Image: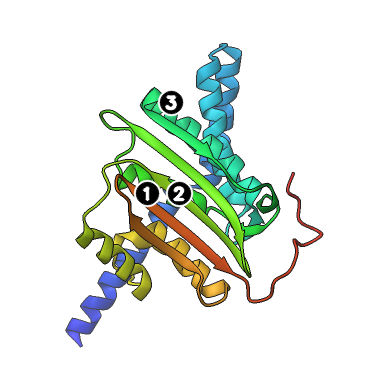
Amino acid sequence: EEELEKLETEKRLEMTKLELLKSQINPHFLFNTLNVIGGMASLEEAETTEKMIRALSALFRYNLKNQDTEVCLSQELKIMEDYMYLQQMRFGKRVQYETGCDPETMEILVPSFMLQPLVENSFKHGEIGKKEGGRIRLWGELISGGYRVSVEDNGNGISTKQLEQINRAMEMDEDQHEERIGLGNVNRRLKTYFEKGSGVILERLHQGLRVTLTVRYKEVSGIDESSDCG
């Protein structure tokens, strides 16, 4: 009984710490503060600083507005421009970014914030931006009964063993694996809401990595008429 009471106390303590952390890092507070700072930068005519703040603010606003929803691919690509702008301000000309999505994919509905983890993978595993830098290329295409989006880089890549571990962890949906925070989270969402065959997979290239996201619809249908892709 004493041991059970101790475990229960520790559990309550951890929950309290989590709630405290949430209250300390309130996303609405951060978003509003960024807007204030952006306004000050504008008054001081610090154009680059203002643009960076506006880009980060757009990421916060997009995340707050679209949690657990579907958006148009065009909206995902637009927010990725803000994300990559901030990365390029950090790494300079060492990082190149290009997209090549088919025009007919622009209005398909996709899970929100699905592209950012794919691109972030290039910085995390490919180490794009370090030393000589590198290139990130994103493209999307329609396939039979769904669509496919891929992100490819020419970075350092990872070992065969690491690749197998990451793909296995995503396939098994292992909670303890760090990939669950990024790629694993996207993979779980796809497998939950879409038809069998949907998911994320990593591949090694001659130089770099490719992350491919595949969605197969349970019911093939057009975009919802109420959706706004503007």
Is residue 169 rendered to the left or right of residue 145? Answer: left
Instruction: Single out the mark in the foreground, 3 or 1.
Output: 1
Q: Is residue 217 above or below residue 132?
A: below
In the image, residue 168 lies at what x, y percent? Answer: 30, 70
In the image, residue 194 lies at what x, y percent? Answer: 57, 72
Q: Is residue 40 above or below residue 55?
A: above
Q: Which residue is mark 3?
A: 89
Q: Residue at x 28, y 28 (%)?
A: 132
Is residue 39 rendered to the left or right of residue 95? Answer: right
Residue 151: which numbered mark, if any? 2
Give residue 165's quadrant in the image: bottom left
Marks 1/2: CA distance?
9 Å
Visible in this render: residue 18? Answer: no
Tell me the crowding category of disc 2: few under 14, some 14 to 19, or many 20 or more residues within 10 angstroms, Cα based.
many
Instruction: For mark 2, give the secondary structure.
Output: strand
Q: Residue at x 20, y 62 (%)?
A: 161
Tell me the crowding category of disc 1: few under 14, some 14 to 19, or many 20 or more residues within 10 angstroms, Cα based.
many
Is residue 207 rendered to the left or right of residue 38? Answer: left
Instruction: For mark 1, give the secondary structure.
Output: helix
What amino acid is at disc 3?
A: Met
Q: Residue at x 61, y 40 (%)?
A: 78
Dot placed on the residue nearer the N-terminal end, 3 or 1:
3
Q: Which residue is mark 1?
A: 121
In the image, residue 39 lies at what x, y percent? Answer: 60, 22
Instruction: Single out the mark in the foreground, 3 or 2.
Output: 2
Visible in this render: residue 178? Answer: yes
**Which image quarter holds the N terminus?**
bottom left
Are the residues flagged by discs 1 and 2 in contact, CB closer than 8 Å? yes
Is residue 136 rendered to the left or right of residue 147? Answer: left
Dot placed on the residue nearer the N-terminal end, 1 or 2:
1
Q: Residue furthest right?
A: 225
Q: Residue furthest bottom?
A: 1
